[in-house]
Image (tube, coloured by chain):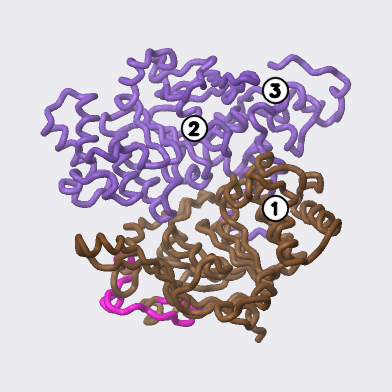
Chain colours: A brown, B purple
Amino acid sequence: MEEPLLKVEGLCRRFDISRPWLNRVLEGGERQFLTAVADVDIAINRGETFALVGESGSGKSTIARMIVGLLAPTSGQIIFDGTRLDGTDGSKMRALRKRFQMIFQDPFASLNPRWRVGDIIAEPIHRFGLLKGVAVSHRVGELLDTVGLSAGDADKFPHEFSGGQRQRIAIARALSSKPQFIVCDEPTSALDVSVQAQILNLMRDLQDEMGLTYLFISHDLSVVRHMATRIGVLYLGRLVETAESKTLFRSPDHPYTRMLLDAVPDLELSGRRRQQVDGEIPNPIDPPPGCAFHPRCPRVMDRCRIEVPKPVPTASGAAACFAVESVPSPALGGLAKVRS
Amino acid sequence: MTEPPVLSVRDLIVEFPTRRGTLRALDRISFNIRKGEVLGMVGESGAGKSLTGAAIIGLLEPPGRIAGGEVHLRGDRIDSLSPEAMRKVRGRRIGMVFQDPLTSLNPLYTVAQQLVETIRTHDDVTEAAARARAIALLDRVGIPAAARRIDDYPHHFSGGMRQRVVIALALCAEPELVIADEPTTALDVSVQAQIIDLIKEICAERGASVLLITHDMGVIAETADRVAVLYAGRLAELGPVRDVITAAEHPYTQGLMGSIPTLTLESTRLVQIPGAMPRLNEIPTGCAFNPRCQQVFARCRTERPSPIERPGGRQVACWLLSETTAEEAHGGTALEGRGPLPAL
């Protein structure tokens, strides 16, 4: 089997959210840590779109930031095309860097308002010394054209564009260093549906043309369904299930995944009765012991309250759940039929 | 014979005077909400959804103003009331749920103080009776241990719980109409579903009508009886939810429905509407959608379509559905040579 393009092993990130030292000394109180990401293993193959889904506070964006190097992991390693990112620096790191890029959620915040669009897009080209002189502006024109804008737009400022057009500029910037891998952190959640459709179509076309690999982060399951080949579901910083996109939507194994799918409003008017979902995501500072999902889980057992479940292999991926472990997935598929 | 609708909006126009001229943000919007009905209002940002809600309850941000049209609440005209009289209508007769529960709650008062104050403003009851009613209401909206938690401050509650408190606050004076403006947008999906169910149930229970404003067609599909689709401050299509979703008649609604990714559909490409919604100062003459419409013909560029009555209680503002223009549409450029007609 081919080596995955990106491998993440045992990735953890804790944030120190203690009050200042002096307050702790005077008023008492312990140091406090928030575990945003715990023991996450991901492998992303070349040319695929791996999606991370989860509700707010599940650690999606923290993982994205660690992968592109905006945030250092507390422990664990990130391996890009066979090279560990944490041990590498200097020129070797720069060579690696230009091979992955990121698209951010808010195109109003991710573009410098004082820079012309052409300069924004050309920055990675200059930074990595890819081209010089006229070739740069030529390339910028080409990129603008690729994302559905015109070469003449290079002289404009970001405020002259709408949200969808700005996201196109952000995509052009991400493409300018000819990367293989793009981390997309909620690229369309700030956009209206009709514009979202344009951007999603564009991203798929670019993937087909350039053979890009995406890590696609979203809270919107319908968008993920449309984009992803494989999906990882996060809950309170842990990966609870990974599966092929098709399998996940047909027969989710983990009770949380099932709950998420049930919660999506139904546009098909099938009259499908949603299962009532109870509770909310617990506070990540003080997560429940054992499986973090157990207080909301319809299939909770004694064991879930004490032990953290390890991922067990399923039909097309893995699920971290004791209930899945004890009842193999075919029986679960049957359950789903009975319920609907 | 027929009861007057709970809310009737006729030709509502909202304008913003600016230095560069007057911008028309809502242009002749008309709709009714019947008793116990949930009317969904969808549109993209800037379409005028929230503005419609704000205009109805008299909370337009100056310099925005109602420049025409009428709003009737069960037969009583409310768009021309004094601010003082309008304040009595708000809360008492129209309840409101906004997107961000934190901005609807005062962080300096406990939930009990806010609920009791609201109940006593609208009803002449003792403090103890108001408190008992508030606890019952919190219990109804699903706050666990309501009798204890009522004395907490808003920041003690999670996002979903806060929105439940806001719903209790909106309903505490037994209003006839609840305007819910993006009530679930700030919440996570799993909580969203709970809140949608709650709004639907509790309003049905009390016979309150709902104007549900959202950009999420899925929420509308699950909650609303009828839906109004807004585009650039104008009503594009209005009709029963099922009809509009499964067989949209306006080209904009058709495009909108096709551009929504769904869980069940395995499509490789989403339908995409080219371009973006025009800014208020750039609304084209004729039909506002004409530059993006695939089926545009000459008349669309010159004359603005009014909503056309369709079978099944639907209204669609599109020349394609007007019989007089059917042949022109097929005849191609029949109107091309003519100068622009005066706007309707």
Badge 2: few (under 14), some or many (20 or more) residues near its Cα, within 10 Å? Answer: many
Residue identifier under label 1: A120
Q: Mark 2 points at which residue?
A: B50
Q: Which of A80 and A229 is in front in this view?
A: A80
Q: In which chain is the residue bearing label 3?
A: B
Identify residue type, mark 2. Answer: Ser
Which residue is the extreme one toward the bottom?
A: A1
Residue A81 image-quadrant placement: bottom right
Q: Mark 3 points at which residue?
A: B304
Residue at x 53% of width, y 44% of height: B217
The chain ID associated with circle 2 is B
- Badge 1 marks a residue whose secondary structure is helix
Q: Which of B258 and A18 is in front in this view?
A: A18
In which quarter of the view is residue B263 placed? bottom right
Crowding at mark 3 (Cα within 10 Å: few <14, some 14-19, many 20+)? many
Where residue A282 sits in the image (x, y, percent)? Answer: 33, 61
**Residue A77: where, in percent of width, then height?**
52, 79
